[in-house]
Image (tube, rainbow, N blue to C red):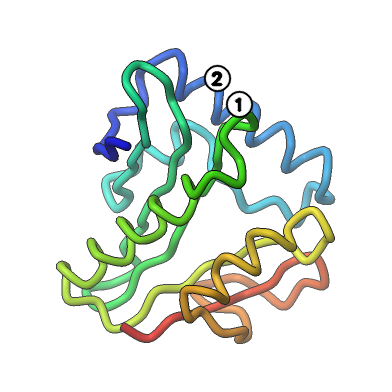
Amino acid sequence: MDIREDDLTGKAIIDLLREHLNNMHEITPPESVHALDLEGLRSPDITFWTAWEGDELLGCGALKELDSKTGEIKSMRTVDAHRRKGVASKILEHIIQEAKRRDYDCLYLETGSFPEFAPARALYARYGFEYRGPFAGYVKDPNSVFMAKKL
C-alpha cells in the first residue's frame, strides 16, 4: 500500500469524496455533518493523503492543524470494496506518525454517534483515542462523538 500526499485533483479521489459527503448526508442530519467538501479540504491548514495499490484508490484521510501543538483528523474514508482490509488502520497510523513528526501533543476527531459509525469509533479506540467533549468550535451534539489521543 502506497500512502501519498494528494492534491485533490484526480477523478478517483473527487468521486470518493463526493460519495463520502453524500453518505454523510444520508446518515446524519444536515446540521451535524462536519465532513469537508473538496474546497474545504484544500485549505492550507489541511494535509490530505490517499492510499493506493497500483492505480487503484483504497482510501483517504486528512490532518488539519488546529494550532502548533494540536491537530484534527478529517475525511477518513475507505473505498467500499476495500473495507475491513486494514486500509483505515494504515492511513490512521500514517496520520498519527505525521502528527508526532510535527511534535503535536494531541490529536482530536469528531465522528458520528449513529450505528453506522461504530466501526470508526472502534478503530479510533483501538489506537488509543478516548471519548471527550467538543473541541475547536464544535458544540455538544447528540449526533456527534468527540475523541482525542495524547501523543
Q: Is residue 59 left or right of residue 115?
A: left
Which residue is labeled 1 in the image?
Answer: 18
Residue at 84% from the left image edge and 50% from the top image edge: 29
Classify the position of the C terminus by image quarter.
Answer: bottom left
- Front residue of this view, candidates 96 and 109: 96
- Front residue of this view, candidates 86 and 66: 86
Q: Is residue 139 left or right of residue 7?
A: right
Identified by mark 1, the residue type is Arg
Identified by mark 2, the residue type is Asp
Q: Quadrant of residue 147?
A: bottom right
Marks 2 and 1, Cα distance to the nearest angstrom?
5 Å
Q: Looking at the image, is 57 positioned above or below residue 98?
A: above
Is the Cβ of the residue at disc 2 closer than 8 Å to that at disc 1? yes
Which residue is labeled 2 in the image?
Answer: 15
Coordinates of residue 31 in the picture (x, y in percent): 77, 54
Residue at 25% from the left image edge and 37% from the top image edge: 4
Coordinates of residue 65 in the picture (x, y in percent): 31, 63
SS of the residue at dot 2?
Answer: helix
Q: Quadrant of residue 122?
A: bottom right
Residue at 51% from the left image edge and 79% from the top image edge: 129
Q: Is residue 100 left or right of residue 117?
A: left
